[in-house]
């Protein structure tokens, strides 16, 4: 189900992430980049909860990724049943 949901909604999720990415000024100033992999449950009303970071190279980016997912809660496309999603969030300075 996770794969089906992602295949159907991947473009919208990527767009939401890129348009709403929280990238702390302190991280940008210090040139901190990387990919943070976030795991969270997405309920049928599109609420994100049980957010966990499963891979990150920076505590600042870890907190920023959690904030990004929290801010997007309820903006994700609603799944038909609760899903566990693994989403990579890319932080780079070439934007």
Image: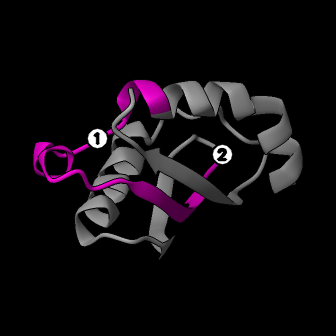
- What is the secondary structure assignment of the residue under circle 2? loop
- Mark 1 — residue? 22
Decide: is 78 above or below 11: below
Determine whether label 2 and label 1 are within 8 Å by CB. Answer: no
Q: Quadrant of the C terminus?
A: top left
The circle drawn on residue 66 is none
- What is the secondary structure assignment of the residue under circle 1? loop
Task: Judge whether residue 39 is colored magenta.
Answer: yes
Q: Report the side of 57 relative to 13 (left or right).
A: left
Residue at 23%, 50% (x, y): give it: 31
Q: Position of residue 78 (x, y in %)?
A: 66, 36
- Mark 2 — residue? 44
> Depth check: 30 or 11 in front?
30
First to last magenta residue range = 18-43
Image quadrant in which you'd find residue 40: bottom right
Q: Position of residue 14 (x, y in %)?
A: 59, 32
Q: Position of residue 52 (x, y in %)?
A: 46, 72
> Depth check: 94 or 20 in front?
94
Mark positioned earlier in the residue sequence (2 or 1): 1
Decide: is 35 above or below 11: below
């Amino acid at each position: 189900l996770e794969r089906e949901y992602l295949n159907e909604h991947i473009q919208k999720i990527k767009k939401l992430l890129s348009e709403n990415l929280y990238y702390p000024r302190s991280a940008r100033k210090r040139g901190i980049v990387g990919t943070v992999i976030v795991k969270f449950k997405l309920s049928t009303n599109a609420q994100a909860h049980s957010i966990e970071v499963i891979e990150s190279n920076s505590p600042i980016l870890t907190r920023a990724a959690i904030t990004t997912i929290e801010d997007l809660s309820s903006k994700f496309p609603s799944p038909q049943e609760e899903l566990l999603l693994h989403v990579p969030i890319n932080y780079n300075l070439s934007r």
